[in-house]
Image (cartoon, rainbow, N blue to C red):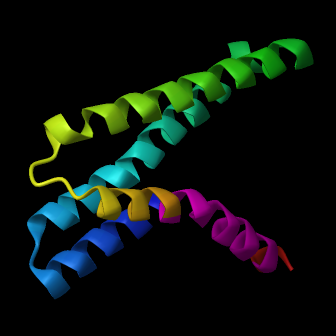
Amino acid sequence: MQAVIGLVLAVATWLVTGRQGWAWSLLYGAAAVVVPGALMARGMTSRLSSLAPGVSAVSFMLWQFGKMGISVAMLMLAPKLVRDLSWPALLVALVLCIEVYWLALSWRGRRKR
């Protein structure tokens, strides 16, 4: 859902404004949320992470720190990787993609009924 929101934001912004720099900034902001989250989800589903409750808790903390580190590294690399970077656009995508969790949880809760 986060990737879809980022893609929709980028395409809509590019179509409305014609500014590719903003669209790429939005995509990169979404990627700074989606990529670390996907890596954490993959790590948390590994066999090692589900051995025992204590191991699982430590694994969660380590993957969470890794997720934050990857996000910070991606944000630090943004000026070098994104041509015509727009920090406001990147941060808008970052915040909206982070907040999609609430929408997804709300949608999932309603669907089960």
Q: As displayed, is residue 26 above or below residue 46?
A: below
Of residues 11 and 88, the one nearer the viewer is 88
Going 82% across and 21% down the picture, which residue do you hit?
57
Residue 31 is at least partly visible in this image: yes
- Compared with 38, 56 (above or below) is above
Residue under the image location 50 percent in, 65 percent down: 96
Magenta segment: does it hold 19?
no
**Residue 50, image x, y percentages:** 78, 20
Relative horizontal placement of residue 43, taking residue 106 as reference (left or right) = left
Residue 63 or residue 18, whichever sits in front: 18
x and y percent of residue 9 in the render? 33, 73
Q: Is residue 63 above or below residue 4?
A: above
Q: Residue furthest right?
A: 53
Give the farthest residue toward the bottom.
16
* Picture mark count: 0
The stretch drawn in magenta includes residue 99: yes
Residue 76 position (above or below residue 48): below
Q: Who's the residue at 26% across and 69% down the image?
A: 10
Q: Within the image, what quadrant is residue 30 found in?
A: bottom left
Q: Position of residue 1 (x, y in %)?
A: 51, 63
Image quadrant in which you'd find residue 93: bottom left
Q: Is residue 106 left or right of residue 82?
A: right
At horizontal 73% and vertical 25% (from top left) the residue drawn is 60
Residue 3 visible in image: no
Frontmost residue, 37 versus 47: 37
Which quadrant of the view contains residue 72? Answer: top left
Q: Position of residue 21 (x, y in %)?
A: 13, 61
Q: Main secondary structure of the magenta part?
A: helix
Q: In the rendered view, does 26 fall on the left or right side of 33?
A: left
Identify the image quadrant of the C terminus: bottom right
Q: Which residues are magenta?
A: 96-110
